[in-house]
Image (tube, rainbow, N blue to C red):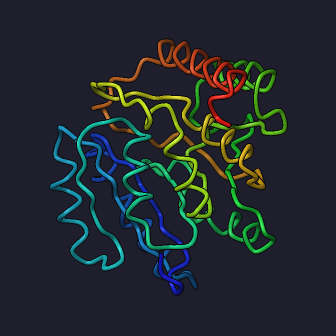
Amino acid sequence: MTDDLFLSIVVPCYNESENLNRGVLAEMHAYLSGARLSYEVIISDDGSTDASREIIQEQLADKPHFRLLSNPHGGKPSAVWYGIQAARGQVVLFTDMDQSTPIDQWGLLQPWFEQGYDVVIGSRGMVRDNSPLYRRIGSGLFGGFRRLLLLHGIRDTQCGFKAMRVPLARKVFPMLEAIRKPAHVTGWKVTAFDVELLFLAEKHGGRIAEVPVSWSDRDIARGKNKSYWSESKEMAEQVLRVKLNDLRGLYD
């Protein structure tokens, strides 16, 4: 970390060429260039198999505070962890490449760090533009199931817009199952690592604030091969594993 750099923004990337080509990095650069903020943007590529890396390298030519990390494929938690390890700021923000929650929502999170919070997360609520009804219902069911077991006071653990103080992030990330026991990952994989991350942050004394943010599904990437129902099943199983791990004392 460097004392004069406040915010490190980590953007995990896997087969995002369509989102990149619609100008998401230019959007981020336009906002950040006008903000009174010392920042860096780390695009952490997770072994993309499309043209993402080439597009990023071309688009970063006029963005001096942006840089690319080229990593082996390991899934989103792996990409975020590579970014955290490379971060030079005091606070790290994770944001998705599709910018469904736009970078300008950072202005809603920053004041909570000034109040002494260690983790500040975006919350989407149930009004989610361009999100089909079955996804909104599924999200509500998942949230209710998860709150029965873990993080009872947090409504939305899955919004891809979260910020943490870097020392805490570096303390708890290596405890995540996806980092402790990396599995062979093929293709795009959505996980509930956010639940385990927030649970660990809370367990290790982190103060968490949840802040409503704007969200609209803007993801047009075609190279992810997502299956909503298989993702949902896997995420529920992961929440159960976190609860069992805690009961077994694995996080102590």
Residue sitting at 36 percent across and 35 percent down?
75
Residue 67's quadrant in the figure? bottom left
Image label count: 0
Nearest the eye: 236 or 27: 236
Q: Is residue 136 visible?
A: no
Residue most extreme to the right: 153
Q: Nearer the viewer, residue 174 or 153?
A: 174
Report the front residue among 122 and 178: 178
In depth, the one of 13 and 238 nearer the eye is 238
Q: Quadrant of residue 55?
A: bottom left
Q: Where's residue 251, x and y in %?
A: 64, 35
Residue 191 in the figure: left or right of residue 13: right
Residue drawn at x 76%, y 50% as measured from the top left: 210
Is residue 240 placed above or below 47 in the rendered structure? above
Q: Quadrant of the C terminus?
A: top right
Seen in the image, is 240 located left or right of residue 78? right
Please tell me whether residue 99 is drawn above or below residue 158 in the rendered image: below
> Is residue 219 shown to the viewer in this render?
yes
Residue at 39%, 57% (x, y): give it. Answer: 83
Give percent across and percent down for residue 74.
32, 36
Q: Position of residue 201 (x, y in %)?
A: 67, 47
Q: Residue 182 location, x and y as percent? A: 37, 31
